[in-house]
Amino acid sequence: MSGLPVLSLIVFVPLLGALALLFVPGDNHRAIRWVALLAALASFGFSLMLLGYQTSGAEFQYREDLSWIPAFGMRYTLGVDGLSTVLVLLTTVLSVVSIFYSWDPIQTRVKEYYATMLLLMVGMLGVFVSLDLFLFYVFWEISLIPMYLIIGIWGGPRRIYATVKFVIYTLVGSLLMLVAILAVAIAHGNATGTFTFSYEVLRGFGYADGLQALAFIAFFLAFAIKVPMWPFHTWLPDAHVEAPTAGSIILAGVLLKLGGYGFLRYSLPLLPDAAKEFAPIVIGLAVVAVLYGAMVSMVQPDLKKLIAYSSVSHMGFVMLGAFVFNIQGLQGAVFQMVSHGVTTGALFLLVGVIYERTHDRQIAHMGGLNGRLPRYAAIFGLFTFASIGLPGLSGFIGEFLVVLGSFQYSGYVAAATMLVVIISAVYMLWMFQRVFFSVPSDWMRRWWPSLTDLTRNEWLALAPLIVLVVALGVFPKPILDAVAGPMQRIVDAVNASHGLTSLSLPW
Amino acid sequence: MVANDLATILPELILTIGVLLVLSVDLFLGRRQKWLLTPLTVAVLVLAGAALLPIWGVNETVFAGFYRVDDLSVFFKLTAMAAAILAALFVPAYLVQRKLPLGEFNVILLFSVIGMSVLASSSDLITLFIGLELMVMPAYLMTGFHKTDRYSNEGGLKYFLLGSFASAILLFGISWTYGLSGSTRIAEMGAVLDGSRGPAGLVAVALLTVGATFKAAAVPFHFWTPDAYQGAPTPITGFLSVGPKVGAFALLVRLFADGLGANGADWYGVMAILAVLTMTGGNVVALMQTNVKRMLAYSSIAHTGYILAGLAAFAHATDPTVRQHGIEAVLFYLLGYAAMNVAAFAVVGMLQRDVRRFGGLASFAGLAGRAPLLAASMAVLLLSLTGIPPTVGFFAKLYVLVATVDAGIAWLAVALALNAALAAFYYLRVIVYMYMREPEAQPAQVDRSPFGSLALSLSVAGVLVLGVFPEPILGLVRGAVASLL
């Protein structure tokens, strides 16, 4: 292993980029865009070094460990396992895509915009590589404020309502999680005499049942709001509708994954007994989310809102897979996260493309675009099918594995979720038909002369996503292999647990 | 031994001489040279701060038991001086703009710091009361400093009346204590106020609690706060919201941790309930405010609640290190609060040239476009007040949370966490105005001054650096509390 602190470079190169932006004159948009893109590309480049991750090697690789605040036992510990590696790569790819895609659409406060995007990268990447609960929390919160600004400054007409709702929702969950993190660390400290926030140390400790139950609820709130799980999802459609396109890509592609990652990394290994105890409730909520998201998607008049609600449904699959506690379900959950990131990111980008041209997203206003924009229609169709879960594209693998896993848990749950595959075909195909094949609306005809097919920059932004959605659909093995080890560990930990025996509260 | 005793109060002596110096220099300066008073005052404060260094680790009770010079008092003095330095830098521009006298302000400010120092060092109830009065008298004057402004007059009068009332209650409590113990030593309070004296002891503790929390602006004894804070010249409000709070908590720590520390279980319940009432009450009312100055005034009440939670953790815990965490949290929070709140009020003051706007939210509209650096600084301060990492405000809240969870009162920690989320709403609203709204047709003018910019950059740097690397201050805080127990 080389002495290069790869993870620190991945996380902090965007910060350096943001600082460099301070010295670029504000009206030189071209230079600003290049600096931001280069910083994101550099981070992406460093993240490619993680491809050297050994599935058979140590659990956490590329570790870095420095003393930070010894008074409280907080350390700067970074490291990745297969799960983190996959999500870090997803994050850097989507960040590059969204920063690149912003090239033309963002024309106001350009410098602030790119600085904010880069800070957002720092927060998200930091969450995925932290192995210290406190450090994790710091990055978790750091990722919140940039998204708040991105929606609030560069968003649509109701942006302020949407962004405040987003922040308050998330903050309630995460502050309770902070209390839970402290409670867990202190319980461990009091029992062993060493006060630490190290994930690897805290993970193996058997916490009292009452503490597990309360801490699980606190973690659950934080992560379930982020995922978002029904009934904590109401911020998501608002945030998506108002966010600028690049913001939506990151929001759907990465920020929601922070929640899923939180469950897999923290809730389950840290509190296996409570996780086992509460699993039926979580599975119930997940099934509701899957069905509810899909059914609500059917009636959405706005393209972005439709995709936002479909995210609720797809992320429900992730939650379902995570809590059936078998290897297929968990692998499926991770795969679904990656696939959803790529697919939904691309769909939001494509909605952005038409929005740039017509400044409208109402499905009723569209129609007949296939004749006018054939290439756009083809790519949109590709991702529509990926979202439905057509075999051969990435969406299929994740959903299939999750259903397989949930079948072992209960046939009814599997049957209910299979139903959703049909509903998702209904809402996606119906949407596709109305937008691309039906008779063009009078409204759309006005734009007819100015409608142009995908530009070079749009192609460039979409290219990596097109490659990924096909490649992962045909050859999912690298991801499944990478996460097999970590997921097996979770399965073992949870299945070895006895559940909660008593619910006597410690306070 | 008098020489030795005098050496331990060198900081107070320097401040006293400084007061006389500023007073006399003021007489000889022409109108154009008045600005020289600011560096002079800052120099006096810095010198006094430097004089704290040799008495770190001394831990002696001097002047026949009336005065305690321990690391705890040194830390309180340090915090008070830091707040005063920031105030001395922020205030002049505002005063000059409104043709208010600079010399008097600096003198009053220094007097107030002396009061806080005496208060922090008191080991006797008499010293305590003298220190308290020496601190709050200047505070009344500062509130009413804008003589021609009726809000300032009203605020000053209210603060004076209710403050005197509170002082009287505290004094009454002190007299009951004296009646029971026959001594005014704080160290001897605990032995008589342990419940063994029946209702009389209860009356004494109740009066002391009410008097002290009155000064700290805890709900339900907070009614003077919003009017006093809103009436006072804005940058002065910044100091008033920090300095006297530091003093009030020095008073609380001296009385309750030092004096009644052993009887923590008796007053834990009161403190915990006051903490929750204060943070919730302050936040809920702050939510309703459309005036940023008044909003910050109510939010300062909420912060009192967070700090009281540290004291409650101290009272509830039995393990000595856990008890220490409670007081450490109080100290760290106060320092962090000093770093962020003085500056936040000062920024409001910079936008108040136009009296009709009166610090309303609208004066912040579109500030990011007009004054990007000022807006960014204010955003950092607000995020810190909210408690978002990596800022000192986050770490301060974290310290309180650690203390409360560690003491086994997780419900209080949860209440604090929910309150912090509530507070996010109104702090972030200012950021919404600065960054997400278009400026008004005639945007509020921004008053800039070199001293103000210096203080603002100091504050922002402090907020960020202490947020990421709190370790040096943590060491100081731990040392300070170690001297108490």
Image: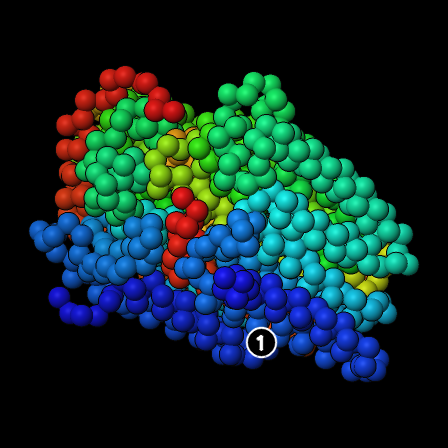
Q: Pointer 1: what residue?
A: A26
Q: Quadrant of residue B277?
A: top right
* Secondary structure of the residue carrying numbered label 1: loop
Q: Quick one: A87 or B293, which is closer to the camera? A: B293
Question: Is B145 rendered above or below residue B484?
Answer: below
Task: Describe residue B270's horizontal placement relative to residue A403 as left or right.
Answer: right
Give the letter of the chain under mark 1.
Answer: A
The image position of residue B64, as x and y in percent, is: 54, 51
Q: Residue at x 67, y 36 (%)?
A: B170
Q: Check the picture and name the quadrant holding the N terminus of chain A.
A: bottom left
Task: Describe residue B11's horizontal placement relative to residue A311 as left or right.
Answer: right
Bin the neighbour count of mark 1 within 10 Å (Cα to Cα): few under 14, some 14-19, many 20 and up: some
Q: Is residue A368 visible?
A: no
Q: Residue at x 19, y 22 (%)?
A: A498
Q: Residue at x 41, y 50 (%)?
A: B483
Q: Residue at x 55, y 41 (%)?
A: B185
Q: Quick one: B76 or B92, which is closer to the camera? A: B76
Q: Is residue B408 visible?
A: yes
The image position of residue B401, as x and y in percent, is: 44, 41
What amino acid does circle 1 point to?
Gly
The image position of residue B283, as x and y in percent, is: 63, 39
Q: Check the picture and name the quadrant holding the C terminus of chain A.
A: top left
Question: Is A234 rendered above or below residue B15?
Answer: above
Q: Quadrant of residue A294?
A: top left
Q: Quick one: A461 or B358, which is closer to the camera? A: B358
